[in-house]
Amino acid sequence: MNAVDILENVEKYFDRHHSFYVMWGGLFALIFFGIYIPFTIHHKVMEKVQAQQMANVYLVAQMDDMNNRMEFMELSYEKKQKVMREVECLAKNIYFEAGGEPYAGKVAVAQVTMNRVKSNDYPRSVCGVVYQKRRGVCQFSWVCEGKSNPRNNSTWRESLKIAENILINKREYNVVGRAMYFHAVYVDPAWSETKRVVKKIGNHIFYH
């Protein structure tokens, strides 16, 4: 069979099945242009909308930080010093209690500290909470162990940043809710039996 015969046979084949290809070709076009393309466009539009919403949230947070820092800068020298002492106390508690923990673990320790500050059962200042003793026992073990000088600069900077975000930028975190207590997973204090577990983060268990 020569090339001409082959072409003639191909033409006859498509002529016989013309209606079939027209029907299925139309169906394919309907699916492609009526469903797939609109879905793809909608998906891409939603991605852009979500990205813009996230950018807006970030921008609002940055503006809030700026406003709060401006308020801090307008404080008197004595009040600035007081705030910075509170920042240092909170940062040290984060560093010595959760220096080796993930970011969420550091924030959780900070949140427990602040929950105690807000409670009538504890001192009303960060430093008061951190250095509090009951019956001669420190509430945070590192205090009684005499630790005071952070040695890991990167961990200290992260701890300090979290403390500044809370006390200067006035950010509110909700990692462990109203948790007021925590302990390392490798200890089992008697008081834990009377508390409700809130969450485990890293090597710490948090309670309310």
Image (cartoon, rainbow, N blue to C red):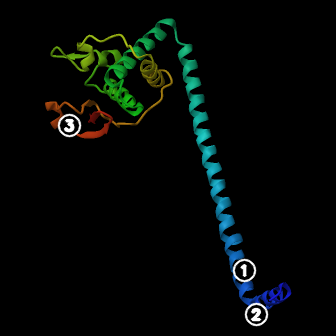
- Seen in the picture, residue 195 relative to 122 is either above or below; the reply is below
Q: Which of these two is toward me, 11 or 173?
A: 11
Judging by the rendered image, the residue that carries numbered circle 3 is 195
Q: Nearer the viewer, mark 2 or mark 3?
A: 2
Name the residue at 29% across, 40% down.
Answer: 198
Tell whether 106 sits left or right of 164.
left
The image shows residue 122 at horizontal and vertical percentages of 27, 22
Amino acid type, callout 3: Lys
Quadrant of the drawing holding the C terminus: top left
Amino acid type, callout 2: Arg
The image shows residue 87 at horizontal and vertical percentages of 42, 17
Count neighbours of disc 2 (C-alpha within 10 A) and say few if under 14, some if 14 to 19, many if 20 or more. Answer: few
In the current view of this chain or complex, which residue is farthest to the front? 1
- Seen in the picture, residue 82 relative to 17 is either above or below; the reply is above
The tag earlier along the polypeptide, 1 or 3, is 1
* Res 102 quadrant in image: top left
Q: Nearer the viewer, mark 2 or mark 1?
A: 2
Judging by the rendered image, the residue that carries numbered circle 1 is 25
Judging by the rendered image, the residue that carries numbered circle 2 is 16
The tag earlier along the polypeptide, 2 or 3, is 2
Count neighbours of disc 3 (C-alpha within 10 A) and say few if under 14, some if 14 to 19, many if 20 or more. Answer: some
Distance, label 2 to label 3, CA atoms, is 81 Å
Amino acid type, callout 1: Gly
Name the residue at 33% across, 19% down.
Answer: 96
Count neighbours of disc 1 (C-alpha within 10 A) and say few if under 14, some if 14 to 19, many if 20 or more. Answer: few
